Image (spheres, rainbow, N blue to C red):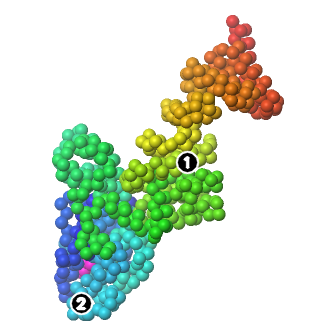
Amino acid sequence: MLLERLGEDSVTPSKPSVYFRTLPTYYMILIIPRKGKTLYSIPPFHVTHFVRRETLYARLQMLFDCANTTSTPLIVVLIGMGGAGKTQLALEYCRRMKDSRRLGAIFWLDASSRNTLYSSMETAAKQLLPDRVFDNPDAAVASVNDFLSSWSERWLLVFDHLDNPEDLPGILNFFPASHRHSILITSRHAGSKELGQSIEFDHTKKGEGLQLLLRSSVVDTDELDAAEQILGLLGHLPLAIDQARAYISKRQLRLRAFVTKYEGRKQETPQFWQYRRMLPGKEVVTPLSLLTTWEMSLQLLGVGEQAAELERVITLFAFFNPVNIGERLFSNDADDGNMTTSPMSIFKVDGHWNHWKFEDAIVKMQELSLLQFSHNDQSEIAVSLHSMVSEWLRMRLGNGLQPTFLNAAVSHLNSHLLSIGDSDHKTQQEGQAHLDTIWRGVESFNIGDHFLDACMTFGNFYNGQGRHEDAEMMYKCALAGFEKAWGPEHTSTLAAVHNMGKLYADQDRHKDAELMYNRALAGYEKAFGPEHMFTSDTVNNLGYLYTVQWRHKDAEMMYNRALASKEKSLGLEHVSTLDTVNNLVSSMLTRAVTKMRR
């Protein structure tokens, strides 16, 4: 069967807690059912660091208590990512039911695969009917069902690790037909919630997380602050918290020292933390880590190239802000040729984005508790990852492959920001969150000169959000890159110079703005001539800069020059021409009024 030790859990809507689990077949507690007797076939419960999650337990208890007062059987499904604590909650419920003798029988079944479930059912059949010989596994299942269906006592079956229902399409055949039964299922597959009422696991509450991490130790204020910081670093995930506790205990670290080590050594997986499970095809239990449980989920994404494609897709998600990764990030540029090297290219059909194909993939990932998704008002899919899953997906690539995915993320975000323009505040805020996340990745890697154009887009976006320091950082990055790659007089270089001039003007840094505008003007005149649109736009901007400095004669000279060029190249009624006329008239009137007042 299995031998497993988990981490403490959390649930939604009640938030749970888990972490230990020890399930070897040779430790089964067995009492043969006679009249007035009980039978419990469950793993022994030896948990030294269990944190009681009474709110969560009360929700589970309430569901089963309601079932005990009706003739309707109840199925409860505990749903959550690997390491969230589903098994520990199930074990706690079984232990309490065993102590209370409220159930006549409890059987714990390993549902991680068809073979392990059949093996567990055969073990139960031999315990119930020790003199019976079963010709095949289906006969054992039928015998268990027949026995429990006609038994007068109330009983519970626990189907642990029903993570791949596709391997068990006939799972309902394993449920005895009896109104006196209750079934508890633990699963990473969201589709399992269709089997009954569900409790979805999320993160621990702060108090529970601190209790698990500190184990009632008295700490000073600084260490308490560090403890809360650790919970944040670990996303309040119970298994990760217990791994951190073991790491701290093993190395006798102060909590503040652990924070420092964690930041510097995120790629280390503690090997001494004993979370074990019987893997398919193995005869002995295998030490696992939290990361290993997620690797196991990835392996269920598909077969061969399909699995590899979906793995690349979810890995790309990890380079964005983990909250609200909207479908528009990828669908907006699906038809312009920018997706040929992106993992998202698999969702193009006949050259166009296919929403339904994308949705099918996202649903599969959510079923394995790798992510969550929702729909907005336009039926667009929005994906969210747990922060630790996101970090793990990036970390497992190594430094060699991270720039490849970062390049794809930059390309998608660049196209997205160009497409949304002056959209609603919510869309702008989401774009800003993704840009902040991606830029932190860019700072860590040299991802090539093609990022420079995106730098300009990002600078414009930050400037539009009023984040001038970030915009200046982007423009300087682009300017330095263009100067190095193309030289100081290249048109791309001049565009960066011009944008920096506009940024400085917006900040009232007039001298810096004039310097940049004049540099851009000289370059555009040389590259395109005095009447080109780029040249005249820069002249117009200089005029506006002189206006706000009350240098009206200089401003009018610039406006007249820009006006002559625009009338010739664009015509008298072009909107750009009329804007310059308006600027010129405004400057002249201001100067006249000022002169009269004097």
Give the mark nearer the N terminus: 2 vs 1.
2
Vertical arrangement, residue 556 with respect to residue 146, above or below: above
Name the image quarter holding residue 108: bottom left
On whether residue 174 falls in the magenta region, the answer is no
Vertical arrangement, residue 453 with respect to residue 199, above or below: above
Q: Residues within 10 Å of mark 2 (few under 14, many from 20)?
A: some
**Quadrant where the image shows the N terminus:** bottom left
Name the image quarter holding residue 350: bottom right
Can residue 538 be seen from the camera position used here? no
Q: Residue at x 25, y 45 (%)?
A: 258
Q: Residue at x 51, y 48 (%)?
A: 407
* Amino acid at the residue labelled 1: Ser
Callout count? 2
Q: Which residue is mark 1?
A: 411
Q: Is residue 513 left or right of residue 439?
A: right
Can residue 518 be seen from the camera position used here? yes
Which secondary structure type mostly characterizes the magenta part of the structure? strand
Per the model, the C-alpha gap separating discs 2 and 1 is: 64 Å
The percent coordinates of residue 143 (x first, y second) are 31, 90
Residue most extreme to the top: 598
The percent coordinates of residue 178 (x first, y second) are 35, 84
Q: Between residue 558 and residue 408, name the one nearer to us.
A: 408
Choose mark 2 or mark 1, whichever is in front.
1
**Quadrant where the image shows the C terminus:** top right
Q: Which residue is mark 2?
A: 129
Q: Is residue 568 left or right of residue 510?
A: right
Q: Residue at x 20, y 68 (%)?
A: 45
Region in magenta: 103-107
